[in-house]
Amino acid sequence: MRVNRVNRRLYIFDYDGTIHDTFHIYKNAVLACRKWIIEEIGHELPMPTDAMIKSWLGITAKDMWLDYAPELDSETRLKAFRFVGSRMHEEIELGNAHWYAGASETLDELKARGHSLVILSNSTSIDATIHMKHFNMERWFDRWYDSESYDWAPKTEIIRNILTDYNLIDEGNSAEESNSAEESRFNAGCRVTSDRKADIDADMDAGCRVIGDRKADMDAGLAAKKLCRCDIVACDYGFGTEDELSVADYHIAAISDLLKI
C-alpha cells in the first residue's frame, strides 16, 4: 500500500531506547567493565545504580565515561569504551539483544504507507553494522547515521545532512553555509544500507518526524524545525526524563503508538 505523496514523511529514529531495549545488555557490559578496571587497572569505581546506567543510554561513550569516571586518563577511558562495546556485541551475537514489543510491526506499517526511514544514533560505526545485520534492518531503513562517523558531532549538526540527503531543505537558502571539507566529511560518514539514492523522492510534502527518548533527540528535532516541516515525537517508554522530553509535539507510550498520530 502507498499513501498519497503529500502524506509521505521522512522518519528519523533514534535507536537505543526508541527501537532497541538496550538496558540489560548495556548494564551487563558496564558492570563487566567496572570489574575489569578494578582488577586489571587497579582503580576503584563505585557501583553504578540502574538510574545512572539508564542516564548514560543515548549519550556518547565519551560523555558517559566523563560522567562516571572523569579521573581516568584518556587512554584508559578509550580502553573502557572499547571493552563495553565489545561485550555488547558479544551479547548481540548470543541473541540477547531485543527490540521493544511491536517495533517490527510498526516499521512494517510505516514502510507500507510509503514513508522513508533512517536511524540517527550516538553510536559507533561498528554498532550500526552489527545491528543492521543482526536484525536485518535493511528491510525498513535506508540509512544509519552514526555519530562516530562524524567525529562525534551532535545530532543537531548531523540532522542537517540527513535533511539535505532527502531534499527537505535548500542548502543555498539555509541559515548556515557548510564548507566543502565539512560537507565531504559528512557525506563520507553516511552509512547507506543499500543503493537507494535513486528511490529518494524530493516531494515528501509532509516533512519529517524525529523520534527519540533523550534530550539529544529533542534538540535534533528543534534543529530540524528551523529547516523544514517537522514533528518531534517523544518515546516516554525510553530512558529520558519528563523534563528532557517536554518540547515534543507528541508523546507515545509504546512504539506502536506512532501509527496513531
Image: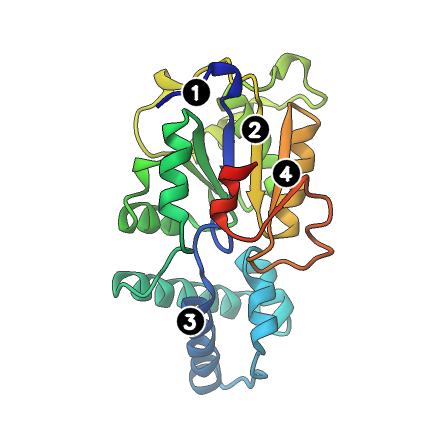
Query: Against 98, is 174 above or below?
Result: above
Callout 1: helix, strand or loop?
loop
**Residue 256: image location, x then y, percent:** 47, 46
The residue that appears at 43% across and 20% down in the rendered structure is: 3
- CB under 8 Å between discs 3 and 1: no
> Who comes first in sequence, dot 3 or dot 2?
3
**Residue that label 4 marks:** 232
Task: Tell me whether circle 3 and circle 2 mark residues in contact (CB < 8 Å).
Answer: no
Q: Which mark is residue 24?
A: none
Tell me the amino acid under the disc marked 2.
Answer: Cys
Q: CA distance from mark 3 to mark 1?
A: 43 Å
Query: What's under tag 1, amino acid-wise?
Result: Val
How has the structure been colored for display? rainbow
Q: Earlier in the sequence, mark 4 or mark 1?
A: 1
The residue pinned by badge 1 equals: 3
Q: Could you say which is closer to the camera, residue 77 or residue 119? A: 119
Q: Residues within 10 Å of mark 1 (few under 14, many from 20)?
A: few
Image spot of residue 220 (x, y percent): 63, 39
Q: Which residue is mark 2?
A: 208
Q: What type is the residue that disc 3 sits on?
A: Ala
Element at badge 4? strand
Image quadrant where one finds the N terminus: top left
Determine the residue positioned at 63% across, 74% down. Answer: 71
**How many angstroms separate mark 2 from mark 1 (CA)?**
15 Å
Pointer 3: what residue? 29
Disc nearest the viewer among 4 and 1: 1
